[in-house]
Image: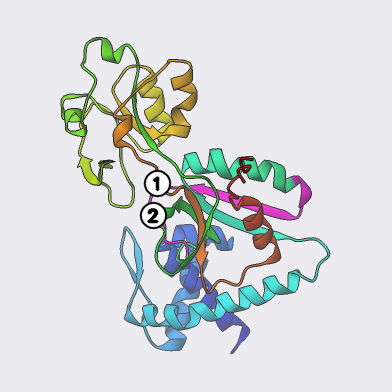
Amino acid sequence: MRRETASDLVAFLIVAREQSFTRAAAQLGVSQSALSQTIRGLETRLGVRLLTRTTRRVSPTDAGERLMSTVGPRFEEVDAALAAVTELREKPAGTIRLTATENAAETVLWPTLERFLPHYPDINVEIVIDYGLTDIVAQRFDAGVRTGETVAAGMISVPIAPDMRMAVVGAPAYFTQRTPPKIPQDLTDHRCINLRLPTHGGLYAWEFEKAGREVNVRVDGQLVFGTAALMLTAARAGFGLAYLTEQQVRADLSEERLVRVLADWCPPFAGYHLYYPSRRQPTQAFNLLVDALRYRRPIRAMKT
């Protein structure tokens, strides 16, 4: 295979995955016009159209999809082999790309990275905040972070945090004129602060369970946010009830800035897990970070 063909295939794969000449050109460090000319040249040599271009997006044709599925994994194998060669260095090195929610990044990833990175100055970490169910393979992330029950099948899953619970909270001032809800269905009579999920574009339904009975409630209110941090801010200001993790509201509950309701309807669930494809060939740097993040349950002392 000619050298220019190999580089053109790399360019095609990036455009197809990003579905954008603008983002792909930024990654490759070339102009959009030069990248477009590269793709046209590749299509001419192969004699088939690989991409369908519209004013809003770029998507692979059937021939492009086939090329992605056959050639893409080969280049990933080359990347893995090159990464393995770097393992011969005395110090672990490389860039690790992770995707996680804001809460997972702040409460789990960053505290570990703050201790981990000073020992490994040649390891770089990029964290992309995303509340959607990101396809980490298509988006070329090394790993993602989700709660244990939402990790896709076929992924290696490593627990990195203890079990979690959700909490419905509101400011004391909010409850001066409203009766606290006793059951989840009472939330329909309250102002609630919603979270919009980017994956489906819809509002997140609040999930509850008690004695094996599951209840999902579609709540309503004046405010909809895309991040939990703003939901917490609005709840403190008395704009309604928020549905957040215990960890996010623990300090506010302790300082009585917020009041909790429906606690008996919020059972524990599997906490954050780091997940990555089973066929991925981990680098030394990646293995070190996984081990640093791995959650180890405290050992309870035996009673004598």
Q: Residues within 10 Å of mark 1 (few under 14, many from 20)?
A: some
Taking the image as shown, residue 115 lies to the left or right of residue 234, namely right
* Mark sitting on residue 151: none
Rendering quarter of residue 229: top left
Residue located beneath label 1 in the image: 269
Circle nearer the viewer, 1 or 2: 1
Q: Secondary structure at mark 1?
A: loop
Q: Earlier in the sequence, mark 1 or mark 2?
A: 2
Q: Which stretch appears magenta?
A: 118-136
Q: Is residue 126 magenta?
A: yes
Q: Nearer the viewer, residue 200 or 11?
A: 200
Taking the image as shown, residue 277 lies to the left or right of residue 185, namely right
* Residue depicted at 64% across the width and 44% down the height: 112
Q: Residues within 10 Å of mark 2 (few under 14, many from 20)?
A: few
Q: Secondary structure at mark 2?
A: helix
Question: Percent x, y for residue 201?
Answer: 27, 48
Residue type at numbered disc 2: Glu
**Which image quadrant: the C terminus?**
top right
Residue 77 is at least partly visible in this image: yes
Position above or below: 293 against 166: below
Q: Is residue 243 magenta?
A: no
Residue located beneath label 2 in the image: 149
Residue type at numbered disc 1: Phe
Question: Percent x, y for residue 175?
Answer: 27, 14
Cα–Cα gap, marks 1 and 2 = 8 Å
Q: Nearer the viewer, residue 281 or 68?
A: 281
Residue 194 is at least partly visible in this image: no
- Are the residues at dot 1 and dot 2 in contact (C-beta closer than 8 Å)? yes
Rendering quarter of residue 21: bottom left
